[in-house]
Structures are given as C-alpha cells and as structure tokens.
Image (cartoon, rainbow, N blue to C red):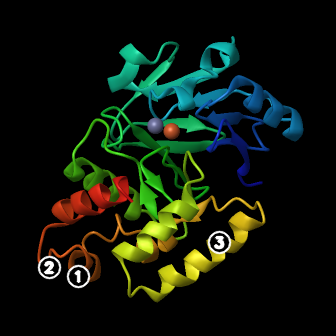
C-alpha cells in the first residue's frame, strides 16, 4: 500500500500534515505547530506517531515538540539548527537520506526563509514537504537569507518530478495568487488558478497540497527566470536571483 497523508489546519493559518505508511505502521508529523492539533489529527486517523520531521526553527513549526516528544518517537531536524531546536535525535543536511515507512527520505537544504531550513522529499511516494520555503504561488519571507539563497532553494524543489505533491506550512494561497497575477499578468494558467483558489477558499477547502507542475506554471518566484516575470518587474534580461529579489520586495509591501 502506498503512503497516506492527512492534512489539518492549526494555529491561525498553519498546516500540519501526518504521513503514514500502512505496511510498517510508521507515522510522521511534518513539523509540529501545536501539540493539541497534532494529537487531534492522530486521534482522527488512528495512527501512532513514530517520527517528527522538522523543517525549521520557527515556533509555529516546533511549538508542539516538547509536548509530543516521547520514547519511541524519532525527531529529525536540520543539523545547522541543532542549537536552536531542542530535542532533535537525528541531525540532517544537504544530500542526507534516512529511512521512513520503508522508503528513503531525501533531504535538501533550502535556506532563505531561515538559514537552517530543510526540505524533505519522498521520491517513491512523490511527496515533498517544503515548510516555509515554497508556498502555493509564493515563497517564504527572507528573514535569514538572500534572494539568491531562495532562488537556489526553490530551484531544488522545482527540479523534482512535475507530479510531485508539494506540502507547505501555511494557507497563504489566496493572498499569494492575488499578488502573483500582478507579477505575471499575462499568465492564463495563473488567472485560472486564482479563480479556482477564490472558489476553494470561499468554500473553506484547503488549496494545499499543490504540485511541482502547478508551481512551475504559476508561481512568480519559481518563474523568476522567465522573460514574462522579468519584464513585469521592469528588469528584462536580469538574473533570476535579481528578479526574485524584486518580486519578493513587491510582495512584502503588497
Ligand atoms: Zn517560518
Ligand atoms: Fe511558518
């Protein structure tokens, strides 16, 4: 049987997600925004927590860690952030892999939002857990990194097989989409996606997960290497890093 996922909302606009392998019975929580919400999700699914995979040190991603950590639960997290994430059992960085639910999980370092941020890829299950690096039609704010860092990080995710499902840390999609149409104004796929996201959001339906293919087609940060987005930024011929920096600055004040 294949890997199952369970997405749930928590805090103000965070997503939690559980990943479960029915064969081994192993279950991972990707980040732990809030103890009570993770426990409720485990109750709803009947799954038993065996792993916690942390993407970055922000409290809305590790707030439930102290309460959930228990013997028999393996906590994996970024080696570079070991000093500011208490309770990590397994430290990982670029190119590392570990086994979960009978498959290999690969780790990318994806700095930009924070310096230690990592992303988890499950190639067999075709899932990627991008934390606050890639959002649907957006990317994380650059608190501890440069536009070049974020471009390189987004490029790692964008290079995965197009059908890969992308789980991210927040429901920011409608606001991202409203901005995205200003940064890539002639993109028909993006306009169609905005309309779809407006409907889903009005109906209370999550817009996550997205896919690599959808982000390649509609995410202005991922598309910072296109003539269209460079032109919309008034920067024809500029490098993707520079264009991304301008897109990010405009989104920050949108
Ligand atoms: Zn964050
Ligand atoms: Fe966050």
Number of the label disc, if any, that sits on residue 132: none
Sequence-earlier tag: 3 or 1: 3
Disc 3 to disc 2, C-alpha distance: 31 Å
Quadrant of the rendering where the C terminus is positioned: bottom left
Q: Residues within 10 Å of mark 2 (few under 14, many from 20)?
A: some
Residue occupied by mark 1: 227
Disc 3 to disc 1, C-alpha distance: 27 Å
Residue 140's x, y, as percent? Answer: 41, 48
Sequence-earlier tag: 3 or 2: 3
Disc 2 to disc 1, C-alpha distance: 7 Å
- In this view, the mark in front (3 or 1): 3
Quadrant of the rendering where the N terminus is positioned: bottom right
Sequence-earlier tag: 2 or 1: 1
Q: Residues within 10 Å of mark 3 (few under 14, many from 20)?
A: some
Residue located 56% across and 75% down the image: 194
Residue occupied by mark 3: 198
Residue occupied by mark 2: 236
Say what secondary structure mark 3 lies in: helix
Asked whether disc 2 touches disc 1, contact meaning CB atoms under 8 Å apart, the reply is yes
Residue located 42% across and 70% down the image: 180
Q: Residues within 10 Å of mark 1 (few under 14, many from 20)?
A: some
- In this view, the mark in front (3 or 2): 3
Horizontal relation, residue 157 to residue 207: left or right: left
């Amino acid at each position: 049987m294949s890997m199952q996922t369970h997405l749930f909302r928590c805090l103000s606009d965070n997503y939690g997600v559980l990943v479960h392998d029915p064969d081994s019975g192993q279950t991972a929580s990707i980040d732990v925004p809030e103890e009570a919400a993770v426990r409720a999700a485990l109750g709803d699914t009947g799954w038993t927590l065996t792993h916690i995979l942390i993407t970055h040190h922000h409290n809305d991603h590790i707030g439930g860690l102290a309460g959930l950590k228990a013997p028999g639960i393996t906590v994996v997290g970024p080696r570079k952030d070991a000093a500011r994430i208490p309770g990590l059992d397994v430290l990982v960085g670029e190119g590392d892999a570990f086994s979960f639910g009978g498959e290999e999980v690969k780790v990318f370092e994806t700095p930009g939002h924070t310096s230690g941020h990592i992303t988890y890829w499950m190639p067999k299950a075709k899932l990627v857990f991008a934390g606050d690096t890639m959002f649907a039609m957006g990317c994380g704010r650059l608190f501890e990194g440069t536009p070049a860092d974020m471009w390189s990080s987004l490029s790692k995710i964008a290079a995965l097989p197009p059908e890969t499902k992308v789980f991210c840390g927040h429901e920011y999609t409608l606001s991202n989409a409203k901005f995205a149409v200003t940064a890539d104004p002639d993109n028909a796929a993006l306009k169609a996606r905005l309309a779809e996201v407006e409907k889903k959001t009005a109906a209370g339906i999550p817009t996550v997960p997205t896919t690599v293919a959808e982000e390649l087609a509609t995410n202005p940060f991922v598309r910072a290497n296109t003539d269209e987005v460079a032109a919309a930024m008034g920067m024809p011929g500029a490098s993707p890093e520079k264009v991304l920096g301008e897109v990010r600055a405009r989104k920050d004040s949108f």
